[in-house]
Amino acid sequence: MKLHIINGPNLNLLGKREPKIYGKKSFKSFFTELQFKFRKVELSYFQSNSESDLITKIQNAKADGIIINAAAYTHTSIAIADAIAAIDIPVVEIHISNTHAREDFRKKSYLSPVVKGCIFGFGMQSYELAIQSFLNQENA
């Protein structure tokens, strides 16, 4: 199974940015742990602060599934939602924090209506839960 993890703006600052919300671990070190834990899954990782780069990555994806944390673009980008709706690859939306327990503007997701499922609020474990959801579907 091949899964792409796509992270949006400011997630390159994980480990440094608001550690009370996002934790103290960098995504690079966490990704290494994911690769070790899920050795039977071919994982790739892409992060960009640019909406157009994220859209291009979604449109060109060749994978069994995509795990996306679009960060702030979740609440603003109809273009990313359209890119997800245009592909035949299942997508799981994740967020490290529980966006529904935060500021009002974070409660609206343009992605949620076009993805297979959503996982919010479990810290970095949200990524693991998304991977496991794909593995569960494969074994169903």
Image (tube, rainbow, N blue to C red):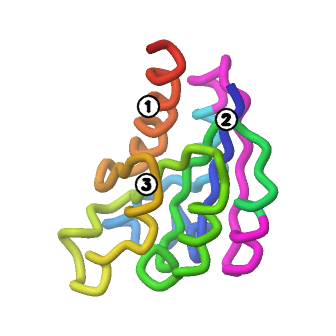
Name the N-terminal-most of marks 1 and 2.
2
**2 or 121, nearer to the observer:** 2
Name the N-terminal-most of marks 3 and 2.
2
Left or right of 96? Residue 135 is right
What residue span does the magenta drawing correspond to?
A: 35-56
Q: Indicate whether residue 57 is drawn in magenta.
A: no
| Residue 131: image location, x then y, percent | 51, 34
Q: Indicate whether residue 39 is drawn in magenta.
A: yes
For mark 1, what is the residue?
A: 133
Closer to us: mark 3 or mark 2? 2
Name the N-terminal-most of marks 1 and 3.
3
Q: Residue furthest top?
A: 139
At horizontal 79% and vertical 44% (from top left) the residue drawn is 62
For mark 3, what is the residue?
A: 94
Q: CA distance from mark 1 to mark 3?
A: 12 Å
Kindly identify the amino acid type of the residue bearing the numbered disc 3: Ile
- Asked if residue 114 is positioned above or below residue 65 in the image, the reply reads below
Q: CA distance from mark 3 to mark 2?
A: 17 Å
**Secondary element type, mark 1:** helix
Closer to us: mark 1 or mark 2? 2
**Secondary element type, mark 3:** strand
Q: Residues within 10 Å of mark 3 (few under 14, many from 20)?
A: many
Q: Which mark is residue 64?
A: 2
Q: Residue furthest left?
A: 101
Image marks 1 and 3: residues in contact by CB distance under 8 Å: no
At horizontal 76% and vertical 51% (from top left) the residue drawn is 61
Left or right of 68? Residue 98 is left
Kindly identify the amino acid type of the residue bearing the numbered disc 1: Ser
**Secondary element type, mark 2:** loop
Q: CA distance from mark 1 to mark 2?
A: 12 Å
